[in-house]
Every structure is written in structure tokens, then in C-alpha cells.
Image (cartoon, rainbow, N blue to C red):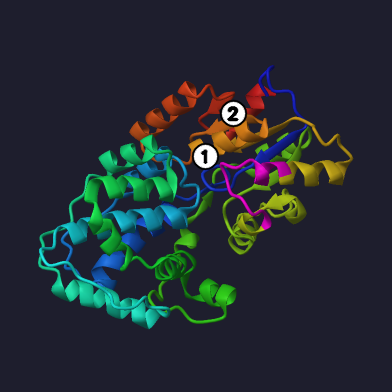
Amino acid sequence: MSPRMESKIVIWDIDGVLIYVVDSYRKAIVDTVQYYFSECVGLKLEKSLMDRANTQEFKLAGGFNDDWELTYAAILCYLSELISNMGKKPDLEFRPEDIDGMLKGLKDLGSVYGGGPLELDLGQVTKRIREHGGGLSATEKTLSELFGEDLEIARKFFFPELIKRIFDEMYLGKDLFYKKYGENPRFYGGKGLISKERPLVDLKTLLELQKRYYFGIVTGRERFEAEFSLKKHGLQNIFSSDLMITREDTREKKPSPQPLLECRKRICEEYGLSVDTKAVYIGDSIDDLKAARNADFYFVAILSGIEKVKEIDILRKEFQDMKCDLIVDDVGELLLHL
């Protein structure tokens, strides 16, 4: 690659690097937030609470490599706003442990909500989240500053198990959801958003790069989704399943270096390389860059997973300011840097 990056190992992220996910994972975030308040709480919303640009604002705040946690954070933001709009504050006398109880609590909340439309400047909120270090814990700190005790009331109507269930049903669709979990979806029976994914790199480019580098994958996806998508797009023979680190394989997640270090360890064992062989990680987010830095890897930033020019320019500047080793618009450009 560049003269400054001498390496035998290239480790890839999947989302936004190998596969385009704006119409799948990003849309699942937006749709899950909307469903939680329109269908579960029962509010008559005249417009969408979020758009895909808002998902990128959370990503830039850092700490949201996990799309479930990003969705949790967005919903907790709007729950706090909802509670702040209420004169008489609602309460739950118990903490529901099953989905039916959660849905009842949310419907009860909606039935007594007399406030106006939910309006929240997520751009400003995510800026404050970033100032506090990013992620769900920084979201809670930000919301505590903005809403005070209303956050504590909002927590009573915040059900991550339910949110994850809705998200997975929308993302996977009926057949894949059943295949993964062994039960029929409850909230969404349509075609999964995963069907809208497409590859961001052509097979020829990968085969050319594979002649000179040992490949691995580190992804925040669970193995079921990772293997399904690689197979669907004809990439399963390029990447060994044994050299792919998914959500289940390490205790810590990016930006921790643990997933990257575990992947390099497996690659070195597989090909008889020195355990400290320098590696390159190819990603598309601030958390990916931080993970690479924490693991003492080189980092290549890919911008092809973002759809809007303004968002691309913002992300490019972020990577430049953080002195990224290499920034490319497309994976194909990597061939120019060999």
C-alpha cells in the first residue's frame, strides 16, 4: 500500500467496506425508532423521528459501532424528550420481564401522553455525546444534563430486549428471523432489509489483493449475518470463516483492540507468521480507526459506504484530522497503493 504501511496481513470490516448497508442496517435503525413510538407507544407521528443522516451523526460521536446500541441510544433520547413534555409524570409499578408486559407499559404511556410532536435536535445531542466520549454511557450522561430526573422516568419505558427484537425482525425478515431464532416474527413479516445489501468491492480486486496479503475479517455483526451476507455476495471463498472475528468471538468490541488482535493471532497461527506481524485494518468509522490505533495496526479508511457527498466530506475531514494512514474513496483504489 503506501510506503509507510509495510504489512503482510489485511483485515477487513464488512459493513460499509465490503458491503453497502445504508439501505439495510442504517434503515433498520431509523425504522425501529419510528416503530417503537408509533406502534408500541401508539403516538400519531406526522413525520419520521430520524433519517439516515442522523445515524451517521451518532457514528461520528463514537462508541456506536454496535447498531443495536445506536438504536437504544436514539430511543432513549426520544423517550426522555417525551417525558419532558408531560405535565403529570407517568410511572411503572413493576419492571416487565416479558414482551407483553413491555408493550402494555408502552401503550399505557402513549394513552396518557398529551404533549405535542416529538422534536429533538439530534445533531446537537450527538455533539454533546461526543464531548462525553461517545457511546450509550455518554448518551445517558448527556440526557441527564438535558432532562434531569425525566431521564430516570424514561428508563422505565426503555426496553432493549424489545428494541433488539423489532430491529432483528426488520433487518432479517420473516424467513431468516425464523432460521436464526427458531420462531416466527411478531412485529414485522415483510422482506428483510438485509436483502437490500450489495457488495462494495468486486471479486477481481479482492483476488488481486489476496495474492499479496493474508486476509481476515473483524466485524460487529453476529456470525449468522456475516456468513449469510458473504455467501450471498459470493465472497465466502475469499475469506476463511476461521479467520473471521464476529460479535460472539471476543468479550470486548471495537474500539477495543481485542477483536483485531485475536484475528491477527489466528492468521499468524494459520500461516506460520510472527505473532507481532504488522497488520492493516480497513474500516469506515471512527471506532474502526480507534480500534486499529489501540491494536497498533495501520488503518485504511474507505468512504464508499456513505451515500451523500456532504457526509463523505465530513467523514474524510475526521479521518484527516486523526491522521489516518490512508483514505480512499473506493476499495479498488487500494491496487494503486501496492
Question: Which badge, 2 or 1, comes first in the chain's sequence?
Answer: 1
The residue carrying pointer 2 sits among few (fewer than 14), some (14 to 19) or many (20 or more) residues within 10 Å by Cα, namely some
Kind of residue at badge 2:
Glu
Residue at x 61% of width, y 59% of height:
232
Is mark 2 in CB contact (under 8 Å) with mark 1? Answer: no
Mark identifier at residue 4: none
Asked whether residue 285 appears in the rendered view, the answer is no
Query: Residue 177 location, x and y as percent?
Result: 52, 73
Q: Which residue is mark 1?
A: 287
Q: Which of the 4 quarters of the picture holds residue 150?
A: bottom left
Q: Dot 2 lies on which element?
A: helix
Task: Tell which tag, 2 or 1, sits nearer the viewer.
Answer: 1
Q: Which of the 4 quarters of the picture holds residue 149?
A: bottom left
Mark identifier at residue 333: 2
Residue 254: in magenta span: yes
Q: Nearer the viewer, residue 115 or 330?
A: 115
Residue at x 20% of width, y 61% of height:
83
Q: Is residue 27 above or below residue 322?
A: below
Tell me the distance, in whole angstroms, between the alpha carbons under discs 2 and 1. 22 Å
Q: Is residue 151 above or below residue 130?
A: below
Kind of residue at badge 1:
Asp
Stretch in magenta: 249-261
